[in-house]
Image (tube, rainbow, N blue to C red):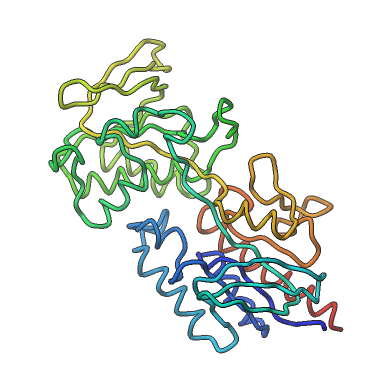
Amino acid sequence: MTSGKVLIIGGGPSGLEAARCVAELGGEAILIEKRERLGGTPDRENYAKLTHHWRDASEAMADMAAAVTSNKNVEVKYQAEVKSMSGSAGNFTVEIEANGAAESLNVGAVIIATGFQHFDPGRATQYYNYYSFPDVITLTDLEKMLKEHNVVRPSNGEAPKKIAFIQCVGSRDRQIGNEYCSKVCCGIASKQAIELRQQLPDSKVMIFYIDMRMYGYWENEIYWPAQEKYKVNYVKGVVSEVLQKGDKLLMRGEDTTMSRPMEVTMDMVVLSVGMEPSAGTRAISQLLGVKQNQYGFIEAGGAGGLDPVATSQEGIFVAGAASGPADLDDSIAKAGLAAARALASVRKVMA
């Protein structure tokens, strides 16, 4: 039996936007989320402010969630996961488990919005002694501190006076197979550097980078203000190791602009970790039979390569960072397109 309903898998920003758009275009959406609440990574990881609009992340996610939960054309199922799927475009039977109970759904199209996960610096190797030295933290660790207005050194609870960011941790790295740029890390590090200087005005902040990749309007909105207004010091260089030196952290590497070795001591080191496909993205790809690219993200593009939300399976679409590194603007834009394409596909079958 053909169905006009669209199933959205994942209740993060792209899933929420896809559900909202399906409903506002006159369709019916079923949104399933494996957690007990909506909001995805910004909610789960306690993001402070969003790059690049500087909006409070909790407030923004609450607004997106409310637009879905208040819409009569959207059904939300919490603590829900897909167990199997059969059928074809216009007539999929999806077996799910929600709140411990099995349920069968009949839908016409599916949108995968299962997102990404942050690179784990200690997953394959001990990157910069992340698991050894408490004052070596990640962007997500710092984001929580910024949200709470309590930036302190984990080792002693004191406010750091000298903080360094190391860019491209887990991105642009052939040794671990993540050759791609994660797109947002430079902007997020610069945003956090500004917030550090706002919350700790006496601190010194340095960003060690291979290349600063500021796309779109981030150049003027984040990069130049960080340097000119907040006096963040950008150093083009490669950090080879982080060692303990007394109660400080010793960073060794090369200043590539000056072509000379460098050593600096810091109170805290922040690793700018990149994006990887989430466990949910990898699992749902296998379950639904959609192709993944060499990095494990869902392969998008369709037969002609110009449809950024099409997957290898007709009637199944992808939105947000499930198909590769994306910022919020990208994720929300693709979610709207995925909603339109999903509705068009079911209406075509039902016509």
Image quarter in which the N terminus is found: bottom right
Q: In the image, is residue 12 above or below residue 144?
A: below
Image quarter in which the C terminus is found: bottom right
Left or right? Give the position of 2 relative to 81: right
The quarter holding residue 240 reads: top left
Left or right? Give the position of 275 relative to 251: right
Q: In the image, is residue 42 above or below residue 257?
A: below
Left or right? Give the position of 279 relative to 163: right
Picture mark count: 0
The quarter holding residue 281 reads: bottom right
**What residue do we see at 70% from left, 54% from top?**
286
Residue 26, percent across and down? 67, 85
**What residue do we see at 60% from left, 31% from top?**
177
Residue 201, percent across and down? 16, 44
Question: Which of the two residues, 163 or 221, is positioned nearer the viewer here?
Answer: 163
Q: Residue furthest top?
A: 260
Residue 154, percent across and down? 21, 41
**What residue do we see at 74% from left, 55% from top?**
290
Question: Which of the two residues, 103 or 111, is positioned nearer the viewer here?
Answer: 103
Question: Which of the two residues, 100 or 155, is positioned nearer the viewer here?
Answer: 100
Residue 333, percent across and down? 60, 63
Question: Which of the two residues, 109 or 213, is positioned nearer the viewer here?
Answer: 109
Left or right? Give the position of 276 relative to 95: left
